[in-house]
Amino acid sequence: MKNVGEAHEELATGERSTRNRVARSILDHGPSTVAELAQRLGLTQAAVRRHLDALVADNVVEARERRVYGARTRGRPAKVFALTDCGRDAFDQSYDKLAADALRWIADREGGGEAIAAFARARIAAQAGAYRRAVEDAAPEERTEALAKALSADGYAATARSAPHPQKGEQLCQHHCPVAHVAEQFPQLCEAETEFFAELLGTHVQRLATIAHGDGVCTTFIPKISHNASASTAGRNPA
């Protein structure tokens, strides 16, 4: 028979596990409402609120109004819960202080922002093979989804969805960015990625939001692509 201490420890372990599931769901799907989390995790909304309260108290998540792109609907914007910088740091990140220091050294010694931009483009080119194969193997109407799956394999937790009316196209959403803190200091990383998406998909694309700028999700608008569309210059990140 379990003693009181063992029972409390088991309960606490279960609570932490469920709390981690809530945070992970926000990481994978982006800022989420209580109802969305409850549905995804098979929990009651009351249970989700209890775990969110604890995560907010620990500065892992924060409440904010959901950003709306396109025409607004009536009523108050839904409250969503997004990971804080502290919360993102709890998950694996493929950067550290050394990366930022190295880029700063490159900027100081090799030509400032242009040198960083060249590095960012070279970095994208080095990992472009898998993305290019995924897109080229997909039907034209499935290329955004194929790119999202390839990005997810690299830890970006990406999804593709129809853009809100009246926009005609899709939104590529990256719910996690392994280099977010470095990109905050060096936006050339985001700009090179956006340019690559445009070249890869053969159309002008527009970056609507980035995690590096404090948004919950990196969101890229991809207009409906005609079969004969040609690549053009990518949209810039929001300032």
Image: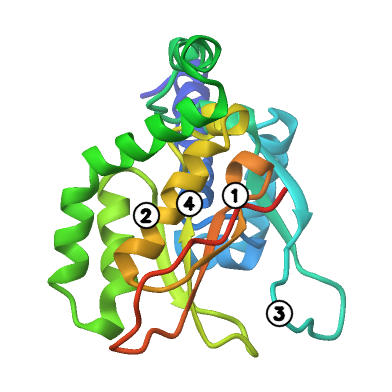
Amino acid found under the numbered disc labelled 3:
Gly
Which of discs 2 and 4 lies nearer the camera? The answer is 2
Q: Nearer the viewer, residue 50 or 188?
A: 188
Decide which of tag 2 and tag 3 comes sooner along the chain.
Answer: 3
Colour option used: rainbow
Label 4 element class = helix
What type is the residue that disc 1 sits on?
A: Thr
Q: CA distance from mark 1 to mark 4?
A: 19 Å
- Total number of numbered discs in the rendering: 4
Please name whichever residue, 102 or 228, is drawn nearer the observer in this view of the structure.
228
Name the kind of residue labelled 4 in the image: Ser
**Mark 1 sits on what residue?**
210
Point out the tag, 1 or 4, that comes first from the N-terminus. Answer: 4
CA distance separating discs 2 and 4:
28 Å
Q: Residue at image x 65%, y 62%?
A: 33
Q: Give the labeled residue for mark 3.
A: 70
Nearest to viewer (mark 1 / mark 2): 2
The front one of 17 and 88 is 88
Q: Element type at marker 2? A: helix
Mark 4 lies on residue: 25
Q: Which residue is mark 2?
A: 196
Are dots 1 and 4 in contact, CB under 8 Å?
no
Measured along the vertical axis of the image, is residue 153 above or below residue 133?
above
Could you tell me if the residues under marks 3 and 1 are in contact, i.e. CB atoms within 8 Å? no
